[in-house]
Image: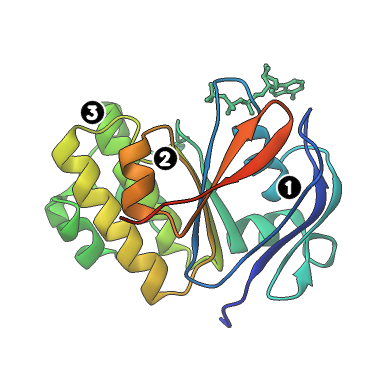
Amino acid sequence: MASGALTLDHLKAGDLDPVSQTIAPGEILCLSGPSGSGKSRLLRAVADLDPHEGSVSIAGESQQELRGHSWRRAVMMVPADSAWWFETVGEHMPAPMTEALKQLGFDTEVSDWSIDRLSSGEKQRLALVRALAYQPRALLLDEPTANLDPDATRETEQWLCKMIREQSLPTLWVAHDREQIKRVADRHLHIEGTRLVESSGEKG
Ligand SMILES: Nc1ncnc2c1ncn2[C@@H]1O[C@H](COP(=O)(O)OP(=O)(O)OP(=O)(O)O)[C@@H](O)[C@H]1O
């Protein structure tokens, strides 16, 4: 599917001032801010999961042009706490993800694992693999490494960055850790009060 920019045009979500941003294909825009400042609500508005004003488009195609589930497949949100509804991991994967699973340290037998046995860190990494398996056109990541130890965090970050570049996915990435933001962000917006303020000095 053609890649393209993710564009937010006067998007009004929760108490934040309207947001206008264009995230280029393969660009990672990190979003940080205090707890409760509205990061997840903004992501949910972009994913069309919450009521909002303003508009969002992917590669020039607007939210209104696509049905809700088609939009959410194209503009894929991975919440901090993922939902699982079948018995095993494999049943949730729309395509075999052998290479991705291997890169994140899983054996192929993970497909047969019961959801009940998964640790929070395993769930978080498998939710990312599942999201990529749907071949989205943009990613919305809500603290994608929150449940991971430092080694797994680095491994997952590197894998995510590689996938985002290879698949030219515009990405909105909520993060708290300044060091992580430095490692992954092309741009960084910080919430101050109700405003999104551009921070400089990312990547290095
Ligand atoms: N559907 C809703 N209706 C009204 N208020 C809501 C709704 N969902 C969330 N809120 C409130 O909006 C504010 C922002 O919530 P949000 O989850 O976006 O915060 P956050 O920045 O992601 O915080 P954290 O870093 O703790 O996850 C919070 O005060 C929350 O209680």
Q: Quadrant of ligand 1?
A: top right
Give the residue displayed 61% in from the left and 76% down from the top: 4
* Colour pattern: rainbow
Callout 3: few (<14), some (14-19), or many (20+) C-alpha neighbours within 10 Å?
Answer: few
Mark 3 residue type: Arg
Mark number displayed over residue 48: 1
**Image: 159 above or below 181:** below
Distance, label 2 to label 3, CA atoms, is 13 Å
Q: Nearer the viewer, mark 2 or mark 3?
A: 3
Mark 2 residue type: Phe
Mark number displayed over residue 86: 2
Q: Which residue is mark 3?
A: 117
Q: Which is nearer the N-term, disc 1 or disc 3? A: 1
Element at label 2: loop
Q: Are marks 1 and 3 in contact (CB under 8 Å)?
A: no
Element at label 3: helix
Determine the residue located farthest toward the front in the rendered image. 201
Q: Which is nearer the N-term, disc 2 or disc 3? A: 2
Q: Are marks 2 and 1 in contact (CB under 8 Å)?
A: no
Residue 44 drawn at (x, y percent): 66, 40
